[in-house]
Amino acid sequence: MAHLEAEGIVKIYRDHQVATEALRGIDFKMKKGEFTALFGPSGSGKTTLLNILGGLDMPTSGKVRLGEKDLTGLRQSELSRVRLFKIGFVFQAYNLIPVLTAIENVEYVLLLQGMPRNEREKRARTLLEELGLGELINKRPTEMSGGEQQRVAVARSIIHLPELVLADEPTANLDSKTAFELLDLMRRLNEERSITFLFSTHDARVMERATRLVQLRDGMIASDEIRG
Amino acid sequence: MAGFIKIAWRNLWRNPRRTIVITLAIALGIWGVLVAIAFDNSFAYQMVDNFIYTHLGHIEIHARGYQKNPGLRLCMTDAEEVLEKVKTSDHIAGYAPRIKAFALAQSPRASQGVMLVGIDPGLEPTVTRIKTFITKGSYFDKDDDRAVLIGEGLAHKLKVGLGDKITFFTQGFICEEGVIESLRVTGLYRSGIGELDKTLVYLPLKLSERILEMKGKLSEIAIIVDDEKNIPLLKQDLKKKLFEKDSGLTLESRELKGAEGGGIHLIKVTKKRAEDMILDPEALGESFRLNAHTAAVSYRLSLPVIAHHSTRDEGESKIELDLHGVDPVTENKVTRLFDSVDIPENSWLAGSEIEKELEVREDWIILDERASYALSAEPGDTIMLELGSELHLKLNDKIRLHPGGKFLSLEVAGILKSEIEQGKDMPLAMISRRQMWETFTGEPCASEVIIRLKPGSDPKEVSDDLVAGLGREVLDWGELYPLLAELKMLMNAVNYVFLLIIYIAVAFGIANTMVMSVFERVRELGILKAIGTRPGQLFRMVILESVMLAAIGMGLGGLASAATIWVWARNGLDLSMFAAEAGESLGMGSVLYPVLTLENILFAVVMALVIAIGSALYPAFRASRLLVVESLRRI
C-alpha cells in the first residue's frame, strides 16, 4: 500500500481574470523509505506539488493521502498537527529562525510537540552531533554558511522522526561540495532511519543520487523511473 | 511557554534601535501619567486631608437635621450617653466633642460673623491639628476659662492681636434675648484653609457650655478613624448603636378650635408615660420646627397648683388649678389662644398685642372663667400659687418637684374666654413658662409640644415624618462636605482622561512597532507555520512581544516615576511664589506633596497591558492568518 498518494491533483491559480493551471491531474504514489527526486524545468509545478503533498497548500481538485489520512479534508489546525508530527520540511534557503541558535532551531519542533525542555535539548544535541554538526550547536544562522544552515535545517526536519521529509530544491544555493555532503546526509538518514524523502530539483547531481526519478512537465508527470 | 517567551524576547531585539525608541516612548508615557496623577491627587487629597484634620474629622455625629440646619438648639441633649457609645466603639483613633454656635464678633475696630466652637482642649488634638496650627500665643491651658483662639485671617479682619478682647454676641440655648461675652485672644492659628481661619473661633468646651447654656449637650462629635478603610464600618456601627427604635413620644392630631377653626391641624406631642416630662423641649421643638410642613411650634408645661386669692369681703379663696406655662408669642402663633383673652379697657394690656407685652413682663396670670369665678378674681387682682399637695411624685430622673416649697405671686392680666384642651377636669390658668421653670422645675421642661401644620398638610404623614426626623445623624466627610468628595471624583476622572490621551499615543506606537515587526518577517512566520506552529501560537507570540515591550516601558517609566515622586515627596512643590492665597483659600496649602494610590498604579499598569494587547491584536491576527505558501514566496 502506498505511503503517500496523490490522486487527480489539479491546481489552478487565479489572478483577477487570468487562470493559470499549475498542475493538471497528477496521480502519484510513494512507498515508505523511498528517496525520490522530482525534477523538471522551472514552472513545471514541482514546488506546487510539494506544497500540496505537505499540506501547505490545497489542490483545486484531487486528493492527497498520507498513510490513512486524507489531507485535503482537514482543517488548518489539523493540518498543522499533521505537519508537526508526520512531515519534515527543508526549504530552498533562509529557512532557519534567525533569532534561535542551531540547537534551538532543531528543538523548536519538539517544543511545539510539548516535549519537556531537558529531553528535547538532549535529543537535539545528540542528533546534531550524530550529523557532525556539534560545532554549530550554539551558533545562530547568521554565523553559519549556507551549507551549514541547510544541514541544520535537515536536522530540524527529522528531529521528530517524521514519516515523510519534503525538500524543495535543497541544494539550489549550495556549491557542489556542500550539495553532495547534504545529499549524502539525506541519503544516510533515508537508509539508516527509513525516512521517506521527496525532493524537488533540477540539479543533475542531485538526480544521480535518487532511487526514483519523477519528471514533471507543464503540470503533468512526464516520466517516472525507478533506479537500482 | 518558556520557549515562546524566549523567542518573543529575542524577536524584540532583532531591531534594538526600534525597540529602545518605543520602550522609551512607553516609559515616558507611564512617567507622564503617574506624575500627572500624583500632581492631580496632591490637589484633591491635600484639600480633603486639610479639611478632615483641620475641622471635619472622618465622621461626625449630630442631632438629626443639624448638617442641613446647623443651629445651637438642634443638638444632642444626651451627650454623655452618646460619648460613651463613641468611646467604646472599635476603630476610633480620636474623638472630639464640640458645641457650635453662630455669633457676631466685635472688636473696637470691626465686626465679623463667626462660628464659636467649644472644644475639649485635651480631646480636640486627637482629631484635628489645631494645636500645631498655633502661630502666636499658645493653645488652651488648663486654667483658661475666658480664652479664645482665633485664626490669623479673623485677627486681621477684626484688627486685633494676641491679648486683645473680642466681644461676642450670640443666642443661648434658652436665652433668646442674646448673650454677650467678652473673651481674650490667647492664641492665633493658621490652618491653611483661609475660609476657616476667618470663621472658626475656638473656646474651651466648659466655657461654651456655660455661656451658651449647653451643659450636658453637644452640637457634634468629630471622630478620626484608625484607618480610612474602616470609615464605613465605624459609621455603620455608630448608626446601629445610636439608632433608637422608639422615640418614647405620642403624637396626636387635633383640629384647631376657635376663631380660625377648621382646616388648620395641630399635632400634640407628649411622652408615652404620662408622668414623664419632655426634657430640653427646645431641641425637640427645633427638630419639629425644621420640618417643611411645620408652621409654628410651642411647648407647654402643665402642673397642678394650688391658687390662693384673698379679698376683704370674702376672705381667702383656694382652688386647685391646672396651670399651663406658655411662651405667649409662640403659643399664639400656634393656637391663637391669646386672641381669646378678655382684657378690661382700663388694663395696662388694653389696646396692645397682648402676647408681645406679656413676653416682656412676666408677673401675670390669665385665668379661665371657671378659675376666675371660683377664686372671685378679676383682672388686676393678685393670685398666689404653690405646687399642688398631691405632687409627691418623682416626675422623672432629672426633675423633682417639691410641693409647698416656693410661691408665686401674680397679677391677673385677663380672662380666657376660649377653652384649652386638657385632660383634667379642673379650672385652668396660664402663666409665663419661664416663671414656671424658674419657680417650680429649676430647668426647662415641657408636658407637651404643640405643632401647627401648614394648611393642606396631612397630619398622619407629618407625624411619621416628625418622628423620623428625631435621633442622631452619623455622616462621613464626603457627606459633610460633598464638594470635597465630588472634587476627588472629578480629579479621578481628570486622571483617567490624562491616562487615556497618553495611552492612545502609546497604543499607536506599539501598534506601529508590532505591524512593522510582523510584516518584515512574513516569510519567517510562514516557515514557523509550515513546520507545525498553530495559528493560535503565532497569535500569542506576537501578543507576548507587545506585552514585553510594554512591560519594559512600564518598568523604566515606573523607575523614573518613583525617583521623581521620591524627590518631590521629600521636598514638596512650593507654589507659594505663584498662588499661595489661592491654595489656602481652596484649602490645600501652598506646598504640594505627591499622592499616588495603589489603585492609580494598578490602573496605569493594567491599562498599559490592555493597550499593549489591544494594539497588537491586529498584527497578531495578521500573523496567525498568513498563508504559508504565500509567505514562503516572500524573500
Image (cartoon, grey):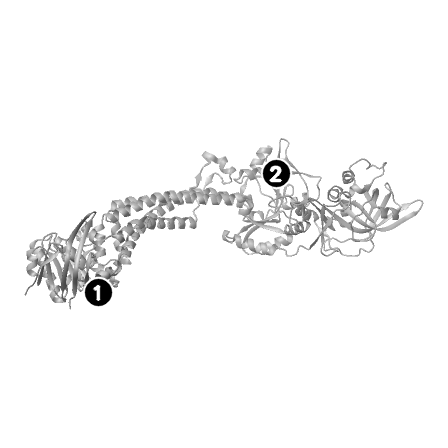
Residue at the top extreme of this rendering: B109
User: Which residue is identified by label 1?
Assistant: A69
Residue A155 can be seen in this image: no
Residue closest to the eye, B326 or B531: B531
The quadrant of the picture occupied by the N terminus of chain B is bottom left
Q: Nearer the viewer, residue B619 or B165?
A: B619
Left/right placement of residue B376 relative to residue B546 reads right
Residue B242, given in percent of the width and then of the height, sits at 61, 54
Q: Is residue B592 left or right of residue B535?
A: right
Q: Name the kind of residue labelled 2 in the image.
A: Val
Residue under label 2 = B114
Instruction: Name the residue: 36% across, 50% down.
Output: B610
Closer to the camera, B127 or B533? B533
State which chain disc 2 sits on: B
Taking the spot 56% from the left edge, 36% from the top edge, the residue there is B152
On the question of residue B509 being in view, the answer is yes
Q: Is residue B583 left or right of residue B73?
A: left
Place of residue B138 in the rendered image (x, y in percent of width and height, measured from the top left): 57, 41
- Is the residue B487 above or below the residue B629 in the image? above
Task: Provide residue A103's location: percent of width, then percent of height.
Answer: 19, 58
Image location of residue A99, percent across then percent down: 22, 53
Q: Which residue corresponds to the image point at 61% horizontal and 55% vertical from the top-left? A: B243
Give the letter of the chain under mark 1: A
Give a yes or no on whether discs 1 and 2 share a subunit.
no
Left or right of A3, for residue B59: right
